[in-house]
Image (tube, rainbow, N blue to C red):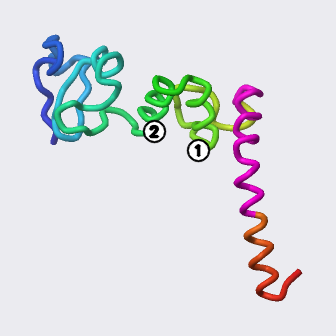
């Protein structure tokens, strides 16, 4: 059983056992929600483990480093839609410009895949 520490390990905010603000990683590192979201960006600085879902952190980091549109495109490519930070998990929910960007970026890859499949079919004697 994981043991909650009495204070946030970053800002020292009190976190009593009944606190709904306490967050814990799998190595019992304890932080307040504010620090996890705004300072630590969902990564425990002590052990490197996630305090929340790894994909959510990856999308957040992509947004910080490359912009929100790129993060939304990645989310759509992954078809990640449980409770993500952006509502771009399917073509139906993603903004049109995001869908267009993903499809445009995927075109060369799709063409190479088709060419590879056609070459394999020819070698196997199939049209």
The quarter of the picture where the N terminus appears is: top left
> Relative to 26, is 23 above or below?
above
Q: Are marks 2 and 1 in contact (CB under 8 Å)?
A: yes
Magenta-tinted stretch: 94-113
At horizontal 77% and vertical 34% (from top left) the residue drawn is 100
- Judging from the image, what secondary structure is the residue with disc 2 in? helix
| Residue 9 located left or right of residue 87 | left
User: Which residue is label 1 attached to?
Assistant: 78
Is 105 magenta? The answer is yes
When asked about the image quadrant of residue 122, the answer is bottom right
What is the x, y in percent for residue 13? Answer: 16, 11
Label 2 crowding class (10 Å Cα cut-off): few <14, some 14-19, many 20+? some
What is the x, y in percent for residue 29? Answer: 17, 31
What is the x, y in percent for residue 40? Answer: 29, 23
User: Which residue is label 2 attached to?
Assistant: 55
Mark sitting earlier along the chain (2/1): 2
Is 22 magenta? The answer is no
Numbered tag placed on residue 21 in the rendering: none
The quarter of the picture where the C terminus appears is: bottom right
| Residue 90 located left or right of residue 82 | right
Which residue is most to the left?
6
At horizontal 77% and vertical 85% (from top left) the residue drawn is 123
When asked about the image quadrant of residue 98, the answer is top right
Secondary structure that dominates the magenta span: helix
């Amino acid at each position: 059983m994981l043991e909650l520490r009495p204070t946030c390990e970053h800002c020292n905010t009190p976190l009593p056992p009944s606190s709904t603000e306490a967050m814990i990683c799998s190595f019992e590192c304890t932080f307040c929600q504010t620090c996890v979201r705004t300072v630590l960006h969902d990564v425990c600085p002590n052990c490197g483990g996630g305090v929340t879902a790894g994909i959510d952190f990856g999308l957040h980091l992509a947004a910080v480093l490359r912009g929100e549109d790129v993060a939304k495109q990645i989310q759509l490519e992954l078809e990640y839609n449980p409770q993500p930070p952006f509502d771009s998990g399917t073509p139906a929910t993603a903004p049109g410009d995001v869908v267009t960007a993903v499809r445009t970026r995927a075109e060369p890859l799709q063409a190479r895949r088709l060419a590879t499949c056609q070459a394999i079919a020819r070698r196997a004697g199939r049209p």
